[in-house]
Image (cartoon, rainbow, N blue to C red):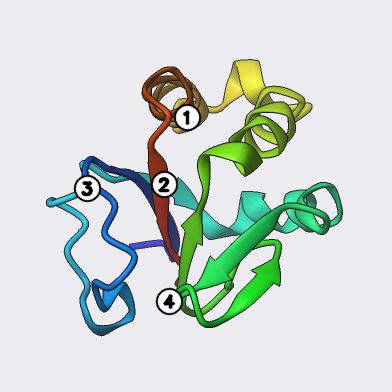
Amino acid sequence: MPCVQEFGIIQQFDPQYPYDEEYLPEKYGCVAVDDDYIDDWWEGLAGMKVYFGTLDRPETGLARWGITLIPPESLGILYDVVKGDPLFGERSDLPPLLRRIEEAMQGGKWMMHYGV
């Protein structure tokens, strides 16, 4: 099985919840993306404001080997990078991810990212 990174929606974001202490992709309806393809996204995501695991750790980009909390205001950057992937039309894992991002954007929700 290839290494994957997973993205899902946090339906009720709680700033006090210890998101960095769990691995529950089913809880967030995560979709998996092959890790090899995400390599091309790092530069485009470098300015995306996020948190690594908790709100006490503001960062940018994605935590490659950890948990990233993506606030609603950063989802546009993620959307543009995914939609702009040159292989978007050839990769079956990207349309479901794009739909999850759109759903989060429409609802003003945070997203959860689990690195490899």
Q: Nearer the viewer, mark 4 or mark 2?
A: 4
The reply to whether callout 1 and callout 3 are in contact (CB within 8 Å) is: no
What amino acid is found at the position of numbered circle 3 in the picture? Tyr
Q: Residue at x 76, y 25 (%)?
A: 84
What amino acid is found at the position of numbered circle 4 in the picture? Thr
User: What is the spatial separation of the Cα atoms under label 2 and label 3, in whole angstroms?
Assistant: 8 Å
What amino acid is found at the position of numbered circle 2 in the picture? Met
Q: Which residue is mark 1?
A: 101
The reply to whether callout 4 and callout 1 are in contact (CB within 8 Å) is: no
Q: Residue at x 78, y 50 (%)?
A: 40
Q: Which residue is mark 2?
A: 111
The reply to whether callout 1 and callout 2 are in contact (CB within 8 Å) is: yes
Q: Is residue 7 above or below residue 72?
A: below
10 Å crowding of disc 4: few (<14), some (14-19), many (20+): some
10 Å crowding of disc 1: few (<14), some (14-19), many (20+): many
Asked which secondary structure carries label 2, the reply is strand
Asked which secondary structure carries label 1, the reply is helix
| Residue 105 locus on image (x, y percent) | 48, 25
Q: Which residue is mark 4?
A: 54
| Residue 106 locus on image (x, y percent) | 43, 17
User: What is the spatial separation of the Cα atoms under label 4 and label 2, in whole angstroms?
Assistant: 13 Å
Give the side of residue 112 with respect to residue 48, left or right: left
Q: Nearer the viewer, mark 3 or mark 4?
A: 4
As drawn, the label of residue 28 is: 3
Question: Which badge, 1 or 3, is on the more N-terminal residue?
Answer: 3
Q: Residue at x 13, y 51 (%)?
A: 26
**Total count of labels:** 4
